[in-house]
Amino acid sequence: MSDEAEISKAALEQGRLLFARKWEFIKGVPSMKFLPPEGPVEISFAGRSNVGKSSLINALVNQKGLARTSNTPGRTQELNYFIPEGSADIPDLAIVDMPGYGYAKAPKSQVEAWTRLVFSYLRGRSTLRRVFVLIDSRHGIKKNDEEVLDLLDKAAVSYQIVLTKSDKIKPPALEKLEEETLAKIAKRAAAFPTLIATSSEKNKGIAELRAEIATLI
C-alpha cells in the first residue's frame, strides 16, 4: 500500500510551501555537454510516453502550462529543467523532465539517442537525489518499465514508483495494483519501499508527492 495516510501534516505543509512558488523552465538539454552546473538537489521524472508525465509536473507546481503536454507521444526529446522563478543563482531544487520511453513509432536512431542521453545523465549526475518512475495505473509495470528499473538498480540511483491516472480504475483494482507493484519492486536494490498513487485530473496524491520531494532537500 502507499504511505499517503502516514504523511504528517507538517510534511504536507513543507511540501505545499516548496511548490507554492512560481516555477519556470530554464533549459532543454539535448546532450550531456549542455547540462547546467551541478548545484541544487535534482529530482527527475521518468516514464513511458503518454504516461501523463507533463500533466503530473504541471499539477505538482500548480501551473497548467509549465511542462508541455501533447497528444503526440515522444514529443519531449530533451532533459527539460525547471526551477523556482527568480532562483537561477541559488536554486534549492531542480525538476528534470526526462524523455519518455517506449514509443515504438519513433525512428530507431532517435530512440537510441534519447536512451544514451537519459542513461548518461542517470549514471553521472551526483546531485540527482531521486527518480520518480511513473507507471500508468491502467497497465501496471510493463517490460520496458522493467528495463528502466534494471538500469536504475545497476546505476544505484534511488527511485520511487508513482502511479498515474489512478482515477481511471476502481479503488479495489487500484489497491490490488499497489500490492502487486510493491511486490515486484521488493527485491530491487535501489527501489524506495513505498509508492504514491496520483491523478493529475483529480489532484489526488499531489500533496503527498510534494511532501515526499520536500524530504529530499
Image (cartoon, rainbow, N blue to C red):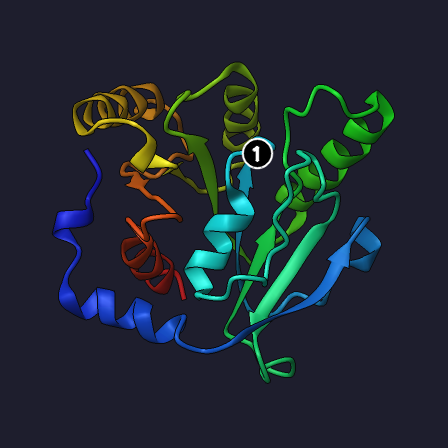
Query: Which amino acid type is shown beneath numbered disc 1?
Result: Asn
Image coords of residue 92 (percent x, y):
50, 74
The number of numbered discs placed on residues in the rendered structure image is 1
Kindly give the residue lying farthest to the top in the view shown.
Answer: 143
> Residue 136 appears at what percent x and percent y?
43, 30
Image-based side of 46 in relation to 170, left or right = right
For image coordinates 50% across by 30% down, the residue present is 153
Quadrant for residue 50, please give it.
Answer: top right
Residue at image mark 1: 50
The vertical placement of 85 against 137, above or below, is: below
* Residue 128 sits in quarter: bottom right
**Percent coordinates x, y for residue 102 in the rendering:** 63, 24
Tell me: residue 88, above or below residue 28: below
Q: Secondary structure at mark 1?
A: loop
Q: Residues within 10 Å of mark 1 (few under 14, many from 20)?
A: many
The image shows residue 162, relative to residue 188, as above or below, that is: below
In the rendered image, the quadrant that contains the C terminus is bottom left
**Residue 32: % across, % down:** 79, 50
- Between 132 and 20, the residue placed more toward the observer is 20
Q: Residue at x 24, y 71 (%)?
A: 13
Question: Quick one: which residue is furthest to the right in this view?
Answer: 109
Q: Quadrant of the N terminus?
A: top left
Specify whether 182 is left or right of 33.
left
Q: Is residue 94 left or right of residue 163?
A: right
The residue located at (64%, 30%) in the rendering is 101
Q: Nearer the viewer, residue 80 or 193?
A: 80
Tell me the quarter of the picture where residue 77 sits.
top right
Rendered residue at 68%/40% (across/down): 118
